């Protein structure tokens, strides 16, 4: 089909023209759009389900939900851009014998006020939705539990160590009782590290001379990995160790086997000392 | 001409990239260019651990205060620096998998306090203890030493991986009388630390020192950031 | 002048035997020689005086690097003209002509040359060399990561490579469009005879050249182990290489700042008569807004690196917490530079993409003013978003919400740019020449980069993704897949004007598909790693991530091969390509209205501008023309059929 014929066809089948919907440009663009949207949404569901590690806390669940929700919001917009770009390439592409001869000029279109306004309005609405989602989820995570298990996390080049105040236990593995709020008081003795127990859905840097605080509630039994997420020098790649979410009885046993006195362990496992909490800044 | 031109582009580019790679490999102290080679553990027969018979091997190495020092005609580290201590003579050790490894470290260096006292505890050895013999001949077997009198530590861990959480930490104490800056390291006094551990599965394990014996921030710059002085690999084969 | 005869070409001027003065004896070899000499002297002196003090090595390295940069530029002739002024005798017209390259043939490409087209070409070659260096380092990284516990590189070397790969690529992408095309093309586009400050223009190039050896010297000084962000206090702890790194940045910022000022002043003062701000080609707007943003952002980089050097070499403690400094101070200043900087990289290529889309869709740019407003809005918002890089640092958790707001707001003007791009394509007569293919690839990649960015803008999700390979994949999609592919489109588009020859588009198509597929494979592999939870910048990783890493490495090799084919196409085109006509794309901007090769001072006869260049299909004569030989008539200042806002008188150029 020559370019002119094609242009004629486009003219004949304008977006709101009389031809059957799916043979009009609008209809074809709609189909491409639908395909890309479905692909995008499928990826949005597939990736968190099958690629993310199994999350072991509500905060981890928030990560999962955010990915799905944002993908569902963003996929139609991205798909629209793809649909128009692809359609333009296939339908309006100029094919001629001599590639050095430019096609005739297209109908000039220096802008379209209503389209721009609708585009702006839709993107603004989407941004507001994203923002509200983010703030709602984030502020829900900021609740501090007075009874939270305190764990002091110390990063140094190139190992994490943990201490459980009140028990005298100091280890390099991070055992946590299930379904009990925990507060990590994170600091470093040398350079900046990133305390990242990925499956708990929380992360904060370990900064020298400062204590930063994050909170979570592990809700699923199982081992996990704590990595350093901030390049910290030579053995950054080796700065990871394991953690374990266990039942509270197992946690008590574990504390005692690591040298806690039975009474101190009971204190840590039951009513925790409130301790010094948010120490932002020095 | 066209196939030749494109071939030439690829050949020149790949030679250039290969040259850069060769440069970086020659800078590296990983295989096969270890300074002073790989130290292979000496077989000692078999040992019985937890009711199982396993191969038994021995490793012996030293920590020197001055990496430019010369031992048995070899410089402790090929690119040594007088202010930089080093493990020697090799920093690459090879041990068999799933066997009992008995390590003897002669600690020639002086020291001080750890950044994190946790590293003064022995962990990951057989029995959770190590045997420390001071220069004046006193021998003690314990699971922790004074965190304010440490020369170096020998800290070894598996490469990242879920199922291979190997970890070993042995502090190498010093004592206040131990002279620093010995020009002939082998002639000086030393602390002897002896311990055994069960090696894990085959693979690359990293070892390093966790005592702040470098320069700059937290004394972890300088030698601590330079691979092959206070750090290296244990190759479990 | 009333005759119909074109004036003689300036470059045919016969210069006297002494024209140029010192310039006659200066070229890159004297620059190298004097730089090395001065550097060596500084090394001797500083070594003798400060070595052995607490911070000795750092001082020695810093002094040596400063002396090298200054010496190289003295040797090149960067300071000739100022020294002439100080000595009281100005340069003659003949000197100026000599400095512009008259009578030197191709040797002027290795000299301090004030001709903006020479500077642009020099930049193009430099950018390609830098991409070669950065790409080689990327190959090292990807090769190391084929297996989980590879012994190809040791951890120290790996960290050094990761750092320098990042910084080389950042430098190259900052100058990849604003160097070659804002210098070569932009002045012609606006009808100027040269940049406003030709000597500063040449200086900006040779200063950035002198920065490159400092950066590569880091490999011989122990390597920078802190990543391109060089977070303190790790970077204060780093080997002496960090001083060379900081000197590189300081030198580079000088160059970028000079170039940015030059670009802005050129556009403000050097436009041809009738070339109002509202008639500027959209690409010009991109370079101006990008340059202005650079003027805001880059000095913060200079400041933070100066503080870094004083921390390291003189014992201050801006960034060392144990003696009262703050690592958050570093992170804040760094990202106040760091986020606007990505838009300094992005805006010029995006503007070039709109320009190219218009030419090859045979349509005006859709929403010209809306797009400019989008550029300005992106620039304005980008200076308020920096702390989204610090969501998980523990600094000011209470500011998470405001920074989430500003970050997500930036997607509105970015969306506007997408609207303008697809609006330009809408019902166009799509002419699928090579540059247009890269425009489509830009759209494809930049959407993926943008969509993955919104997860990272959300604090709860960022708590998982921060410091993770997902971030790496995201910014490679935006900076490589978006900005660099946009710049590639620009290279293909303006290559006939720069080199005078056409590219072989069949070879180009092969390169295009290899690059396009290579990018998807490489960075989908990294998204996968990111979802699985692999941290960035690690040389040894959990075998769980092995398949994803191998996919990424395979893609990276394909990408490398694609770029090599592209490189071959450029070299082959430059040497053997078909001779290009003056206007192969039948475009309407002024750079296509001058002959190829472009004569010195560009316009034999001053151009006449009566409308913007986007009159495709409007059935009117081009509003931006270079008369063939007649003197320019007084231009019509009241535009025919152009929008309000066009009434600013250009002034400036004759």
Image (cartoon, rainbow, N blue to C red):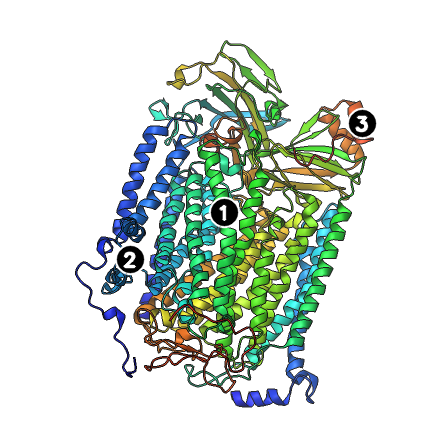
Indicate the position of residue C633 as horizontal and vertical percent values: 38, 81
Badge 2: how crowded within 10 Å, few (<14), some, or many (20+)?
Answer: some
Q: Which mark is residue A267?
A: 3
Which quadrant holds residue C97?
bottom left
> What is the quadrant of the N terminus of chain B in the image?
bottom left
Viewer-nearest of discs 3 and 1: 1
Give the residue number, with chain letter if any, for mark 2. C110
Q: Is residue B97 left or right of residue B185?
A: right
Left of B184 or right of it: where is C230? right
Query: Gap in Å between the C-alphas at discs 3 and 2?
Result: 76 Å
Which element is circle 3 on? helix
Q: Which mark is residue A218?
A: none
Element marked by disc 1: helix
Say which residue appears at 55% left-offset and 18% top-offset: B149
Q: Nearer the viewer, residue C529 or C412?
A: C412
Picture layout, residue A92 above or below residue B40: below
Task: Say whether residue B137 is visible.
Answer: yes
The residue tagged 1 is C301
Cα separation, mark 1 vs mark 2, equals: 29 Å
Q: Could you tell me how far apart the alpha carbons at marks 3 and 1 are, in whole angstroms?
A: 50 Å
Q: Residue at the spot x=47%, y=16% of the render? A: B190
**How far across and down, in percent of the image, does residue C19 sit?**
21, 60
Mark 3–mark 2 contact, CB under 8 Å? Answer: no
Q: Comparing marks 3 and 2, which lies closer to the viewer?
A: 2
Question: Looking at the image, which residue sits at the far right?
Answer: A271
Label 2 sits on a secondary structure element that is helix
Q: Chain of mark 2?
A: C
Residue farthest along the left direction in this orientation: C17
Which chain contains the residue that carries disc 1?
Answer: C
**Circle 3 crowding by C-alpha within 10 Å: few under 14, some 14–19, many from 20:** some
C560 on left or right of C93: right
């Amino acid at each position: 089909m020559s370019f002119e014929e094609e242009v004629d066809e486009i003219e004949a089948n304008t977006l709101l023209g009389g031809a059957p919907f799916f043979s009009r440009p609008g209809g074809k663009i709609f189909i491409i759009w639908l395909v890309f949207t479905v692909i995008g949404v499928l990826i949005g569901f597939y990736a968190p389900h099958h690629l993310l590690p199994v999350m072991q806390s509500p905060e981890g669940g928030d990560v999962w939900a955010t990915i799905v929700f944002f993908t569902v919001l963003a996929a139609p917009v991205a798909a629209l851009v793809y649909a128009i770009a692809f359609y333009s390439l296939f339908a309006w592409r100029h094919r001629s014998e001599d590639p050095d001869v430019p096609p005739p000029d297209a109908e000039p279109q220096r802008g379209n006020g209503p389209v721009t306004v609708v585009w702006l309005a839709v993107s603004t609405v989407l941004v507001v939705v994203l923002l509200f989602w983010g703030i709602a989820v984030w502020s829900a995570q900021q609740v501090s539990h007075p009874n939270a298990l305190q764990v002091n996390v110390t990063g140094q080049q190139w190992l994490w160590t943990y201490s459980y105040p009140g028990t005298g236990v100091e280890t390099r593995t991070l055992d946590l009782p299930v379904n009990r709020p925990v507060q990590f008081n994170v600091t470093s003795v040398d350079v900046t590290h990133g305390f990242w127990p990925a499956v708990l859905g929380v992360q904060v840097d370990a900064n020298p001379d400062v204590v930063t605080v994050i909170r979570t509630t592990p809700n699923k039994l199982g081992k996990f990995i704590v990595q350093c997420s901030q390049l910290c020098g030579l053995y950054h790649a080796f700065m990871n160790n394991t953690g374990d979410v266990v039942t509270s009885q197992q946690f008590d046993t574990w504390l005692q086997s690591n040298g806690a006195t039975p009474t101190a362990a009971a204190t840590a496992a039951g009513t925790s000392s409130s301790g010094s909490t948010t120490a932002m800044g020095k | 001409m066209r196939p030749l031109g494109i071939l030439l582009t690829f050949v020149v580019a790949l030679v250039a990239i290969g040259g850069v790679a060769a440069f970086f490999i020659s800078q590296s102290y990983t295989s096969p260019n270890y300074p002073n080679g790989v130290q292979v553990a000496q077989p000692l027969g078999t040992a019985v651990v937890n009711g199982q018979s396993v191969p038994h091997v021995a490793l012996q190495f030293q920590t020197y205060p001055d990496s430019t020092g010369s031992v048995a005609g070899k410089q402790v580290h090929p690119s040594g620096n007088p202010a930089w201590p080093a493990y020697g003579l090799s920093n690459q050790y090879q041990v068999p998998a799933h066997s009992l490894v008995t390590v003897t470290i002669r600690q020639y260096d002086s020291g001080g306090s750890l950044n994190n006292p946790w590293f003064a505890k022995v962990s990951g050895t057989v029995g959770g203890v190590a045997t420390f013999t001071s220069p004046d001949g006193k021998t003690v077997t314990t699971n922790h030493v004074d965190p304010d009198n440490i020369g170096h530590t020998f800290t070894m861990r598996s490469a990242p991986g879920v199922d291979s959480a190997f970890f070993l930490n042995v502090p190498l104490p010093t004592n206040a009388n131990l002279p620093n800056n010995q020009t002939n390291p082998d002639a000086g006094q030393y602390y002897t630390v002896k311990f055994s551990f069960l090696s894990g599965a085959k693979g690359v394990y990293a070892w390093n020192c966790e005592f702040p014996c470098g320069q700059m921030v937290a004394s972890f710059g300088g030698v601590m950031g330079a691979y092959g002085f206070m750090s290296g690999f244990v190759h479990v084969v | 002048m009333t005759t119909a005869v074109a004036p003689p070409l300036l470059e045919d001027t016969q210069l006297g035997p002494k024209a140029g003065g010192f310039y006659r004896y200066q070229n890159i070899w004297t620059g190298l020689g004097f730089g090395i000499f001065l550097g060596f002297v500084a090394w001797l002196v500083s070594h003798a005086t400060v070595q052995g003090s607490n911070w000795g090595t750092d001082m020695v390295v810093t002094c040596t690097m400063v002396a090298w940069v200054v010496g190289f530029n003295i040797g090149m002739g960067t300071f000739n003209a100022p020294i002439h002024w100080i000595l009281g005798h100005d340069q003659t017209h003949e000197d100026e002509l000599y400095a512009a390259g008259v009578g030197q043939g191709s040797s002027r490409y290795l000299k301090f040359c004030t001709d903006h087209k020479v500077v642009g070409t020099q930049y193009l070659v430099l950018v390609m060399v830098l991409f070669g260096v950065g790409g080689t380092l990327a190959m090292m990284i990807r090769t190391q990561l084929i297996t989980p516990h590879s012994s190809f590189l040791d951890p120290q070397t790996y960290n050094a490579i990761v750092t320098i790969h990042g910084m080389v690529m950042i430098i190259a992408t900052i100058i990849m469009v604003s160097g070659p095309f804002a210098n070569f093309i932009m002045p012609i586009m606006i009808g100027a005879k040269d940049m406003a400050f030709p000597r500063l223009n040449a200086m900006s190039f040779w200063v950035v050249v002198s920065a490159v050896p400092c950066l590569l010297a880091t490999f011989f000084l122990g390597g920078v182990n802190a990543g391109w962000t060089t977070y303190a206090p790790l970077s204060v702890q780093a080997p002496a290489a960090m001083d060379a790194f900081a000197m590189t940045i300081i030198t580079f910022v000088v160059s970028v700042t000079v170039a940015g000022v030059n670009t802005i002043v050129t556009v403000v003062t050097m436009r041809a008569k009738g070339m109002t701000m509202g008639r500027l080609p959209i690409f010009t707007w991109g370079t101006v807004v990008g340059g202005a943003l650079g003027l805001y952002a880059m000095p913060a980089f200079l400041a933070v690196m100066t503080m870094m050097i004083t921390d390291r070499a003189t014992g201050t403690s801006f960034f060392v917490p144990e003696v009262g400094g703050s690592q958050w101070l570093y992170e804040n200043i760094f990202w106040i530079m760091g986020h606007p900087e990505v838009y300094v990289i992005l805006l010029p290529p995006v503007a070039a993409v709109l320009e190219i889309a218009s030419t090859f869709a045979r349509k005006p740019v859709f929403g010209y003013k809306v797009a400019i407003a989008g550029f300005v809005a992106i620039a304005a918002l980008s200076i308020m978003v920096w702390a989204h890089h610090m969501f998980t640092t523990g600094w000011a958790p209470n500011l998470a919400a405001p920074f989430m707001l500003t970050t997500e707001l930036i997607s509105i003007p970015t969306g506007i740019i997408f609207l303008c791009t697809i609006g330009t394509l809408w019902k166009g007569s799509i002419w699928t020449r090579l540059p247009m293919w890269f425009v489509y690839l830009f759209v494809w990649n930049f959407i993926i980069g943008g969509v993955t960015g919104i997860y990272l803008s959300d604090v709860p999700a960022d708590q998982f993704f921060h410091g993770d390979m997902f971030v790496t994949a995201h910014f490679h999609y935006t900076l490589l897949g978006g900005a660099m592919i946009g710049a590639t489109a620009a290279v293909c588009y303006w290559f006939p004007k720069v080199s005078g020859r056409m590219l072989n588009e069949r070879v180009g198509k092969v390169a295009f598909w290899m690059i396009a597929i290579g990018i998807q494979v490489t960075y989908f592999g990294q998204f996968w790693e990111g979802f699985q939870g692999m941290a960035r910048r690690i040389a040894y990783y959990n075998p769980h991530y092995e398949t994803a890493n191998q996919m990424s490495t395979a893609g990276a090799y394909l990408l490398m091969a694609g770029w090599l084919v592209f490189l071959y196409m450029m070299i082959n085109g430059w040497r053997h390509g078909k001779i290009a006509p003056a206007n192969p794309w039948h475009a309407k901007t002024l750079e296509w209205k001058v002959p190829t090769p472009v004569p010195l001072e560009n316009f034999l006869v001053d151009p006449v501008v009566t409308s913007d260049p986007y009159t495709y299909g409007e059935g009117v004569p081009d509003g931006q023309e270079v008369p063939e030989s007649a003197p320019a008539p007084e231009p019509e200042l009241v535009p025919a059929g152009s929008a309000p806002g066009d009434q600013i008188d250009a002034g400036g150029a004759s």
